[in-house]
Image: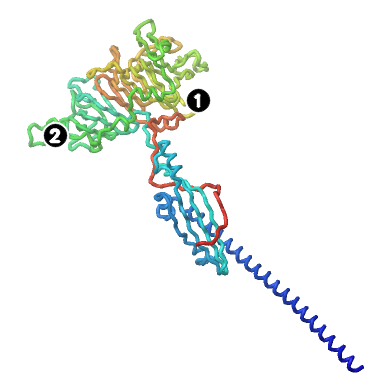
Amino acid sequence: MTKLKNKKRGLALFFTICVIGLVSLIVYGMMHFMRGEVHLSENYVDGTVALLLAESGVEECLFSIKSQMTSKDNVIYKMITTQDSGTIDVDLTRLAKGEDKVEPVMKGGDIKATVTWELNKRTSQELANQGIPRDLAREGTITINSMGVYNNTKKQVEVKKTVKAVLLKGGINSNSVGMIAPGHSLYLNEATRDSFKIDTFDFWDPWEFIVKGGKTYMKDGVIVDLPKWLMLTAMKKEMEHPWLDMGMGWTGWTGGANFTETQLEYSNDPITREYYKWQGVFSYPWWEKCSSELYHSETKKVEEYSDKQVQAYPASVYKKIANRVIDPEDNPTMGKYFQDVTFVEAFERNKVTYNKVLPLYGWGDWRNVSNKYNKYFGNPNKAHDTSHAVEINGITYVKGDVFLEGWVKGQGLLVVEGNVYVGGDVLTLPDDKGCESCLGVIALRTETDKSDDEPRSGKIIYEPHHDSDWSRFGLTTPFRNLSPRLEGSFHAEGGMEFKTDSSMKKLCNMDIVGNLSVDRFDRRKMPNDVRITYYDWQSILEKSGYDYTIDKTIDYTNLYDLAMTKEIMSWREVPASL
């Protein structure tokens, strides 16, 4: 019995050892499995961190490129604008290692990146086929490869985008039509030498010419006689002996020209003053005529102006860009606009007729003027009615003669291939929007006018007239049109003339507010006294909605504007190779 019991106890030990071994095997397997899962989890985390580091490298590259797109010193800019292809390593130390007061993206991580550029030659050829210079626009593909490293785990991302490089636009090179010589109050291409000469025995009313403001240009210069009163007033500081020097003319006190308030310019012969200069007590004669001194200290020699510099162009240019063209040669039906305009004084006296002209008559009708109490015994006239003002906006081109007088509104140029007859005042009104109006009158010679000595066209002719229907009483004062006021910029290729046979011719004066430009200037053919007060009408013309530019070309700088498309050609993970 005892032996049998001992054998049973040994069997139990065996089963116990087997169970313990099996349990140990199960436990070991579970531990091995769990360690594998932990290792896989660690690799996944490291891989995710490495991938995020790689993507941050891409974003940093994109930011660097975009923020330095127009920097000529940037290596990426140089590569895109000068090379057909290339690769550049990008410094991402700031992300991987951090810098002052900036922590790295992930401690223990590292980032590397390269930027590769490849020019799309097909696109460049297409642009060249369209007539666009090859250097004007460049297009290609930029590839960013960024690799992130974390705990020896590497992940690399590749991104492709399209990049366009276009030369930045500079100023627009263009010629502009507008007021002729807008910076000058008086602009003379050719003037008779005795234009400002005081006649010896002209004691009735010597001709006087005054220019105020702006610049005055005379290409070939003139000799200007000085009157005594000018020496003692505005020219006093310019003279060596203002009290002893003698003026020109019968009395030597009036006439000549006053240029003391304008800057004088000339290109060829100078602008000089003429007077009798005091030589001293011990010299004989005591006075000698002097005509070699510059007119004043503001008299300067300049380079001759070209036509484009002063915005002067042939008739064909104005006609091409005009928004209103009246040319009876091209369109015979427009001949109906040209007619004879006749004015007579009261009692059928002093008839004045403007033959075959386009009438631009801006005066209204005194009958339309509302009568107030103080006007019942007054004399309302046509100037009181402003409803018929001549409207000129943009460029109005007329082939033929024009008659101009009265109120004018709008911002524009009246270009006439022919003569412009002025019958009286030419005054500006605010336009329909309440803005300031401006008028430029340009009279050009016709194609058939080839005369060199005496042009038949291209003139601005002031021919005064009376008007029996000017006012309620049917009477016009004899002085109404003797001294017209012209507001605007006036250019006459054939010169400005005063046409009348009136016995009061010496009382006729002219006041120009703006500027006067002529290719032929003869002072003796103009009204007795002329005053030009400079006004910058060009600045008002430029506010007009009409485009006055011609031959517009775009200039480009030597700096490119780099831009990447928003769309991504590809964004993918690739095997780590950096």
Inspect the image, locate mark 2, and give the three-letter code of the amino acid beneath it: Trp
Q: Residues at badges 2 and 1 in contact (C-beta under 8 Å)? A: no
Left or right for 555, reference 140? left
Report x, y in % for residue 38: 67, 70
Left or right for 80, reference 191? right
> How crowded is the residue under tag 1: few (<14 C-alpha within 10 Å), some, or many (20+)?
few
Q: Among all residues in the image, which is located at the extreme right?
A: 1
The quarter of the picture where residue 413 lies is top left
Left or right for 269, reference 398? left
The numbered disc on residue 40 is: none
Residue located at (40% from left, 36% from top): 131
SS class of the residue under badge 1? loop
Inspect the image, locate mark 1, and give the three-letter code of the amino acid beneath it: Asp
Residue under label 1? 432
The quarter of the picture where residue 209 lies is top left
- Which quadrant: the N terminus? bottom right
Q: Earlier in the sequence, mark 2 or mark 1?
A: 2
Report x, y in % for residue 511: 34, 24
Residue located at (9% from left, 36% from top): 281
Q: What's the distance in space between the residues labelled 2 and 1, CA to CA?
A: 59 Å
Mark toward the viewer: 2 or 1: 1
Report x, y in % for residue 42: 64, 69
Of residues 378 and 261, which is closer to you in this image? Answer: 261
Residue under label 2? 278
Residue located at (12% from left, 31% from top): 288
